Image (cartoon, helix red, strand yellow):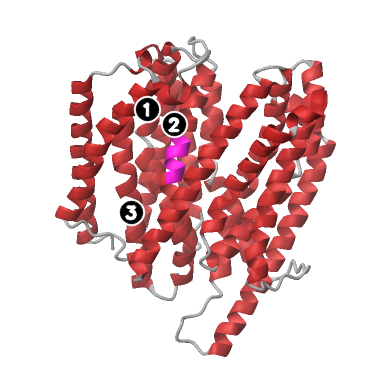
C-alpha cells in the first residue's frame, strides 16, 4: 500500500472514530434528558460538570498538545542517520515525555485540590443565580468531578505521545469510550441508586474520564514505553515547552470565549429561549467542523513537527496537502448546511417541547455559523502549521484579534439587525471573529513559509471553490423542486429529503475532483 493511500485511510478511520464519538455523545445527552429533564438535579449537574471542563479548555487543552508535540518530535532524526544516533534521540524524547507527563499530573493535581476546596465559591462566582439547595448540590458534585482535569490532561499528553509514534485511531476513540461508559451507567446502574443517583452519575463521569487515560496506557505498555516517575524542572525541553505554553493557551481562546460571548449576548435578545437556541445551533456546527477538521489536523501535526528544520520542501508540501484536503472537505459541507439546515435541525431537535419556531430560529443561526466554517478549518490547520515551526506568537495575536472582532461585531449586530435575524446576529458575530483570525494567519503564513503557496495550489483551490458552488446550485435546484417544509414533515420525510438533495451533489463533486484532476500535493 503506497503512503498516500495509507494516509487517506488513516484520516478516514480517525474521522469515523470521531463520528462514533459524537454520536455516542448525543445518546449520552439524550439519556441525561430522559432521566433528569430540566429539574434541580439536572441544573446542578450541568453547572458542576461544565466548570472543570471549561477550566481544562481555557488552560490546558490546546497548550498541552500544541507545545508537547513539536518539542517531542524535535528530537527525531532522519531515517538515514546512524542507528545509535536515532536510538539516543528517541531516549531523549521519551525522557522529556515522562518529565512532561509528571509535570502535568502535578500541576493538574494541584488545580484539582484547589478546585475541590473552593467548590462553593466557584459555583457562586460562575452561576450566582442558583437557589441555595441547587448551589449546595452543585458544589458537592463539583468536588467529585473536579479531578476530571487530572485525567483529561494526562490523557491528552498520552495522545501526543501516540500520535507522534504514528498511532492515531485509538486516540480518536477515547471520547467514544468515555461516552459509552456513561451510557452503560444510565442503562444498568442509575436506577439502582435511587435518590443518590445524581452522585453516582458524577462518579461515573469521573471514572469515564479515567478510562480515557487507562485506555491510552495499553498501547504504550505494548510499545514498552519507558515511563519513569521522574521530574526535572531544569530540563531544557520542558522549559521550551513551558515557554511556548502561554501564547498557545491564549491562541486557543477564540472558541471558548466565542461561546461565552454568544451566550452573553443571546441572553439580551427579546426572543424566548435565545440562549438555548444559540447552544443548539453551535452544537451542530461544532460537531460538523470538529469531525471535518480535527482528523486531518491531528494526523498532520506530528509529521510537520518532525519535518520542521530538516526538510523545508517536504514541510511546505505536507502543509499544502493538509490545507487543500481540509478545504476540500469543508466547502461542500458548508454548501449543504446552507441548503439543508432546516431539515437537519428538524431531524435532530423537532420533537417534544422544541417547536417549529425554535427550529426556524436555530436554522437561521446555523446558517450564520456556516459562514465561518472554512475560517475555522483554516484557523485550526494554520495554527498547527505555526506550532510545528514553534512559532506561537502569530496564532496568539490572531486569536486575540478574532476575539475582539467577535465582541465588537456581535454587540453591533445584536443592537442593529437582531430583529431580522435574531440569534443569527450572535452567530454571525462569531463567524466574523473566525474570519478575522483566519485572514491574519493566512497572510502571515504566506509571507513567512517559503513556497507554501504555489501555482498548483491556487488552481486546485479555485477548482474546489468552483465544484462546491456547482454542488450548491444542484442542491438548491433539487430542494426547490421537492419543496419540502421541514417543520411540517415527519422525521423520515426530512431524512429522505436530505438524501435526495445531498447525494447527487456529492456525486457531482467527487466526479468533478476526478475530471478536473484536483491535486492535493
What's the distance in space between the residues labelled 1 and 2, CA to CA? 9 Å
- Secondary structure beneath dot 2 equals helix
Q: Residues within 10 Å of mark 2 (few under 14, many from 20)?
A: many
Q: Quadrant of residue 466?
A: top left
Q: Position of residue 100 (x, y in %)?
A: 68, 63
Residue shown at 26% from the left, 38% from the top: 503
339 or 135: nearer the viewer = 339
Circle 3 residue:
325
| Marks 1 and 2, the one that precedes in the sequence | 1
Q: Nearer the viewer, mark 3 or mark 2?
A: 3
Circle 2 residue:
430
Residue 99's disc is none
Q: Position of residue 493 (x, y in %)?
A: 33, 22
What's drawn in magenta, residue-wise?
A: 285-291
Circle 1 residue:
368
225 or 318: nearer the viewer = 225
Amino acid at each position: 500500500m503506497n503512503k498516500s493511500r495509507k494516509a487517506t485511510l488513516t484520516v478516514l478511520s480517525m474521522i469515523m472514530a470521531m463520528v462514533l464519538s459524537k454520536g455516542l455523545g448525543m445518546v449520552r445527552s439524550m439519556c441525561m434528558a430522559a432521566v433528569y429533564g430540566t429539574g434541580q438535579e439536572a441544573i446542578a449537574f450541568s453547572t458542576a460538570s461544565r466548570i472543570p471542563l471549561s477550566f481544562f479548555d481555557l488552560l490546558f487543552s490546546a497548550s498541552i498538545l500544541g507545545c508537547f508535540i513539536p518539542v517531542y518530535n524535535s528530537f527525531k532524526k532522519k531515517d538515514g542517520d546512524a542507528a545509535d544516533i536515532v536510538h539516543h534521540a528517541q531516549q531523549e524524547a521519551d525522557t522529556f515525555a515522562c518529565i512532561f507527563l509528571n509535570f502535568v499530573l502535578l500541576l493538574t493535581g494541584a488545580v484539582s485540590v484547589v478546585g475541590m476546596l473552593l467548590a462553593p465559591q466557584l459555583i457562586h462566582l460562575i452561576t450566582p443565580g442558583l437557589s441555595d439547595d441547587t448551589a449546595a448540590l452543585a458544589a458537592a458534585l463539583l468536588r467529585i468531578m473536579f479531578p476530571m482535569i487530572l485525567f483529561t490532561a494526562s490523557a491528552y499528553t498520552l495522545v501526543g505521545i501516540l500520535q507522534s509514534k504514528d498511532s492515531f485511531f485509538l486516540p480518536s476513540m477515547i471520547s467514544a469510550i468515555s461516552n459509552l461508559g456513561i451510557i452503560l451507567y444510565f442503562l444498568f446502574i442509575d436506577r439502582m441508586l435511587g435518590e443518590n443517583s445524581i452522585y453516582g452519575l458524577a462518579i461515573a463521569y469521573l471514572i469515564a474520564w479515567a478510562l480515557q487515560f487507562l485506555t491510552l496506557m495499553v498501547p504504550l505498555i505494548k510499545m514498552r514505553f519507558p515511563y519513569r516517575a521522574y521530574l526535572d524542572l531544569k530540563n531544557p525541553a520542558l522549559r521550551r515547552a513551558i515557554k511556548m505554553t502561554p501564547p498557545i493557551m491564549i491562541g486557543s481562546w477564540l472558541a471558548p470565549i466565542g461561546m461565552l460571548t454568544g451566550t452573553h449576548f443571546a441572553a439580551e435578545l427579546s426572543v424566548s429561549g435565545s440562549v438555548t437556541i444559540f447552544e443548539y445551533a453551535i452544537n451542530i456546527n461544532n460537531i460538523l467542523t470538529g469531525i471535518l477538521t480535527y482528523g486531518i489536523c491531528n494526523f498532520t501535526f506530528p509529521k510537520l513537527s518532525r519535518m520542521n528544520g530538516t526538510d523545508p520542501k517536504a514541510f511546505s508540501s505536507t502543509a499544502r496537502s493538509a490545507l487543500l484536503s481540509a478545504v476540500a472537505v469543508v466547502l461542500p459541507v458548508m454548501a449543504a448546511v446552507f441548503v439543508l439546515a432546516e431539515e437537519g435541525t428538524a431531524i435532530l431537535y423537532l420533537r417534544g417541547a422544541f417547536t417549529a419556531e425554535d427550529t426556524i430560529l436555530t436554522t437561521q443561526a446555523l446558517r450564520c455559523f456556516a459562514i465561518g466554517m472554512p475560517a475555522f478549518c483554516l484557523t485550526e490547520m494554520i495554527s498547527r502549521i505555526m506550532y510545528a515551526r514553534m512559532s506561537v506568537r502569530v496564532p496568539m495575536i490572531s486569536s486575540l484579534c478574532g476575539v475582539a472582532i467577535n465582541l465588537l461585531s456581535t454587540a453591533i449586530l445584536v443592537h442593529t439587525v437582531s430583529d431580522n435575524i435574531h440569534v443569527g446576529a450572535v452567530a454571525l458575530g462569531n463567524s466574523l471573529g473566525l474570519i478575522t483570525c483566519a485572514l491574519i494567519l493566512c497572510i502571515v503564513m504566506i509571507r513567512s513559509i517559503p513556497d507554501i503557496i504555489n501555482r498548483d495550489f491556487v488552481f486546485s483551490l479555485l477548482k474546489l471553490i468552483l465544484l462546491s458552488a456547482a454542488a450548491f446550485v444542484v442542491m438548491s435546484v433539487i430542494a426547490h423542486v421537492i419543496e419540502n417544509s421541514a417543520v411540517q414533515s415527519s422525521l423520515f420525510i426530512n431524512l429522505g429529503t436530505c438524501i435526495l438533495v445531498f447525494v447527487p451533489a456529492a456525486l457531482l463533486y467527487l466526479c468533478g475532483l476526478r475530471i478536473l484532476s484536483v491535486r492535493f500535493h
